[in-house]
Image (spheres, helix red, strand yellow):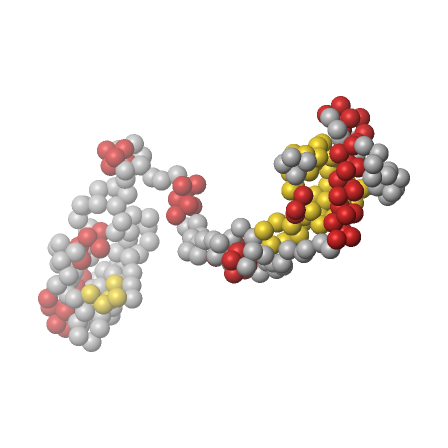
Amino acid sequence: MNTNETKKMPEDGQTAPATMGDQGRPLRGSGNMTPDALSGTGRLSDRAVRSGENNGRTPDGEVILGYMPVPPDFKYMDVYLKGRPKHEEFDAFWCRHPPMDLRRRAKIFAPFNALKGMDELRAAQEILYVDRAQPDEDRQRELNHQLSVLRGYTFNGRMARANQIMVTVEYFTPCTDENHPAFDLHRGRYQTVHGMVLNVDDVKETLRLLTTDGEAVVEFCDIRSITPETDTLFEDVPDDLW
């Protein structure tokens, strides 16, 4: 469709039909114009402005385009009345400006999270951190006995695979969030890990476990309790067995 084609004007005394866009829809603000209201170029004539023949006007003579009043000497009125241009597929304009894919167009309207990370920060502030519990002398003696027994069952890799000692260890994890008040207070949380004992290292003072997520290493000083799957594992073994 040639957008520059001059529209046929009605004869005197007839009402001008609504100006049609490219898709056959009347343009807003142009359906109530009389023949004298439009000039040959598609502009509103001065006489129509003075007489107020067009119903789509304000009392001051301004044209109403949709919901916005436009001055009568609006220089782009003819462009508006011509409607939206339509370009055929694979023409010169279409090749230079191809339409955007619908999936890419949908990304434009994707929700934007201006406060990204705020939910994680609030959740971190709600974590309850506690002080590290200091075991008394009896509790420390019991933990040393348990670690000694586990070291005997897992003296080397062959013994660890053969015995397959399964335990649940409760240990202390310090707070790593520098923005949380608990970081400066050296507080943390108690967590549990379940797995097979691989090694008890007296030099590094660590307990190494094989869990479903891989290997886990816990320091002796962080251990709060050790619970074996076999209730009598630590009871039937004397301290000097190994």
Q: Residue 132 at x, y = what percent?
A: 64, 55
**Left or right of 183, for residue 31:** left
Count of numbered circles on the image: 0
- The quadrant of the image that shows the C terminus is top right
User: Which residue is outermost to the front?
Assistant: 240
Q: Is residue 64 above or below residue 121?
A: below
User: Which residue is outermost to the left?
Assistant: 46
- The quadrant of the image that shows the N terminus is top left
Q: Residue 192 at x, y = what percent?
A: 70, 47
Which image quarter: residue 105? top left
Query: 173 or 73: nearer the eye?
Result: 173
**Residue 214 in view (yes/no):** yes
Q: Is residue 47 above or below residue 174?
A: below
- Report the residue at 78% width, 52% height from top: 138
**Left or right of 234, for residue 131:** left
- Report the residue at 75% width, 28% height from top: 155
Q: Residue 7 at x, y = what percent?
A: 20, 50
Q: Residue 57 at x, y = what percent?
A: 22, 70
Q: Is residue 223 above or below residue 121?
A: above
**Residue 192 in view (yes/no):** no
